[in-house]
């Protein structure tokens, strides 16, 4: 299964995942096409914390929501810190972060079982992990950079879905969204040391390639695939989008490609 690039009537380009579309879930991952922000923010900036104007970001949220079909004013945003805190959000959280106040505080994962309550997490190279249980009708999203990956936020999310929401592992659908690929993601030895502390050698051999000196190429897609499969997600219920944020500057936003001068991509899930 592959990700699909869609163009809405309002000109917004967004990505959907066949695994979720086939299950009837409203969802989407933004691109840099179709927004009103300036070039320094790659036009479709959905992050209120990037220095863009409040008006531009709000307009981008409205356009993105029009493209996918949800009420942007109800969107619950995450305020990410590269940790493993996961919040279960309800109707009381509707609109949290949409006034520029930052979203659910110090949280890298959101879960909801409330219909028509959009949850949104932000990216610009880090790995989006999205979940949907079509039986229990629960959606979840987690932000997994290299720190979140080492800490196993994907497995923490699965355990939380099982324990708190009564989900069965065999029912959960999961997507590894657009993010930086191994060919683009160079890291230093200290990062590899942390992965070697966490993962068995056969995984390290698969996810790392040594370059000259103390530099390595790191595969966060494969690492998160291993984490999710080890957590009980079945292979047929796991999709890797295969879209690299760094390789596709005409479509995506990359922190590494721009040296941090950028807007933010986002993924949204709506029951």
Image (cartoon, helix red, strand yellow):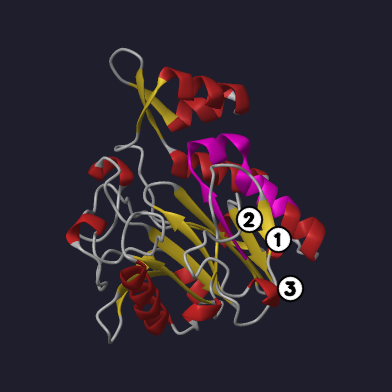
Q: Which residues are magenta?
A: 140-159
Where, by quadrant of the figure, is residue 74 drawn? bottom right
In front: mark 3 or mark 2?
3
Q: Residue at x 54, y 42 (%)?
A: 82
The quarter of the image holding the N terminus is: bottom left
Mark 3 or mark 2: name the one nearer the start of the chain.
3
On screen, residue 236 versus residue 172, left or right, reads left
Q: Could one spot residue 241 in this view of the protein?
A: yes
What main secondary structure does the magenta stretch of the protein show?
Answer: helix
- Any magenta on residue 82? no
Which numbered circle lies on residue 136?
Answer: 3
Mark 3 or mark 1: name the one nearer the start of the chain.
3
Residue holding disc 2: 234
Kindly report the distance in space between the C-alpha atoms of the residues bearing marks 3 and 1: 12 Å
Residues at discs 2 and 1 in contact (Cβ within 8 Å): yes
Binning the other alpha carbons within 10 Å of mark 1 as few (below 14), some (14 to 19) or many (20 upward) gives few
**Relative depth, front residue between 105 and 205:** 105
Mark 2 or mark 1: name the one nearer the start of the chain.
1
Is 134 rendered above or below residue 70? Answer: above
């Amino acid at each position: 299964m592959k990700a699909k690039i869609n163009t809405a009537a309002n000109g917004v380009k967004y990505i959907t995942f066949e695994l979720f579309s086939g299950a009837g879930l409203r969802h989407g991952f933004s691109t840099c096409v179709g927004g009103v922000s300036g070039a320094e923010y790659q036009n479709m900036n959905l992050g209120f914390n990037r220095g863009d104007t409040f008006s531009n970001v709000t307009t981008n949220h409205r356009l993105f929501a029009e493209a996918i079909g949800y009420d942007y004013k109800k969107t619950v945003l995450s305020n990410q810190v590269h940790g493993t805190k996961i919040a279960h959000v309800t109707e009381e959280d509707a609109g949290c972060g949409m006034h520029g106040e930052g979203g659910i505080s110090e949280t890298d994962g959101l879960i909801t079982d409330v219909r028509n309550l959009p949850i949104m997490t932000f990216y610009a190279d880090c790995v989006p992990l999205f979940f949907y249980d079509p039986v229990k009708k629960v959606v979840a999203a987690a932000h997994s950079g290299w720190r979140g990956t080492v800490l196993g936020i994907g497995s923490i999310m699965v355990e939380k879905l099982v324990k708190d929401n009564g989900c069965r592992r065999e029912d959960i659908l999961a997507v590894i969204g657009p993010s930086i690929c191994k060919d683009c993601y160079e890291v230093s030895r200290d990062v590899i040391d942390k992965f070697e502390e966490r993962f068995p050698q056969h995984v390290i051999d698969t996810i790392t390639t040594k370059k000259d000196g103390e530099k390595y190429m790191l595969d966060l897609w494969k690492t998160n695939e291993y984490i999710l499969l080890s957590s009980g997600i079945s292979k047929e219920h796991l999709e890797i989008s295969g879209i690299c944020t760094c390789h596709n500057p005409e479509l995506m936003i990359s922190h590494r490609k721009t040296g941090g001068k950028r807007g933010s991509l986002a993924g949204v899930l709506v029951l």
